Structures are given as C-alpha cells and as structure tokens.
Image: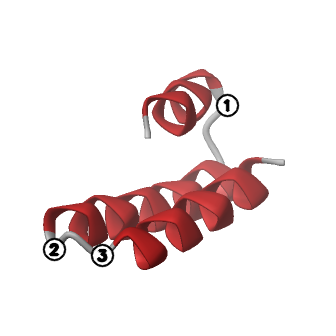
Amino acid sequence: MKAVKAAWDKAPAGPKKDAALTHYQAAEKAQTAKNDADCLKSLDAAKQALA
C-alpha cells in the first residue's frame, strides 16, 4: 500500500492519477474489510493506471 501511495503522490495530475486514486481507495476499503484478494487486485489496478 505504501509503495502505491508513494507512486500516486509523485504522479502528475491528470486522468491516470484520478483513476489510480479510485483503485487505491477501493484497496483501502478492502483492507479494512480484511479482504486481501480484493485489496491486492485494487492495488494492481492502481499501479496499472499510473503506468
């Protein structure tokens, strides 16, 4: 989570950063719900959005 958040923080503003934020927030919710599979899936999607 920290690595994805750090990458998001460094990314320039724009649609990619907005999409990554949506996925990151979903990952936070999944982590809170103790759903590791969905958390990892959302983190991967966030990384892809920033790429």
Q: Amino acid at mark 2?
A: Ala
Q: From what the image shows, is residue 14 above or below residue 36? A: above
Secondary structure of residue under mark 2: loop
Colouring rule applied to residues: secondary structure
**Which numbered disc covers residue 33?**
2
Task: Locate residue 1 relative to residue 46 in the image: left or right.
Answer: left
**Which numbered disc covers residue 35?**
3
For discs 1 and 3, the disc positioned in front in the rendered view:
3
Secondary structure of residue under mark 3: loop
Q: CA distance from mark 1 to mark 2?
A: 30 Å
Secondary structure of residue under mark 1: loop
Residue for point 61% across, 38% down: 13
Judged from this view, the residue extending furthest toward the left is 32
The answer to whether the residue labelled 3 contacts the one labelled 2, judged by CB atoms less than 8 Å apart, is yes
Q: Nearer the viewer, residue 12 or 1?
A: 1
Q: Amino acid at mark 1?
A: Pro
What is the tally of numbered marks visible in this picture? 3
Task: Locate residue 31 relative to residue 33 in the image: left or right.
Answer: right
Q: From what the image shows, is residue 13 above or below residue 20? A: above
Residue 12 place in picture, x, y as percent: 67, 31
- Residue with the mark numbered 1: 12
Q: From what the image shows, is residue 19 above or below residue 41? A: above
Residue for point 47% across, 34% down: 5
Q: CA distance from mark 1 to mark 3?
A: 30 Å
Residue 7 place in picture, x, y as percent: 61, 29
Residue 34 place in picture, x, y as percent: 20, 69
Residue for point 73% across, 48% down: 50
Q: CA distance from mark 3 to mark 2?
A: 5 Å
Task: Locate residue 24 relative to residue 14 in the image: left or right.
Answer: left
- The mark that comes first in sequence, 1 or 2, is 1
- The mark that comes first in sequence, 1 or 3, is 1
Q: Amino acid at mark 3?
A: Asn
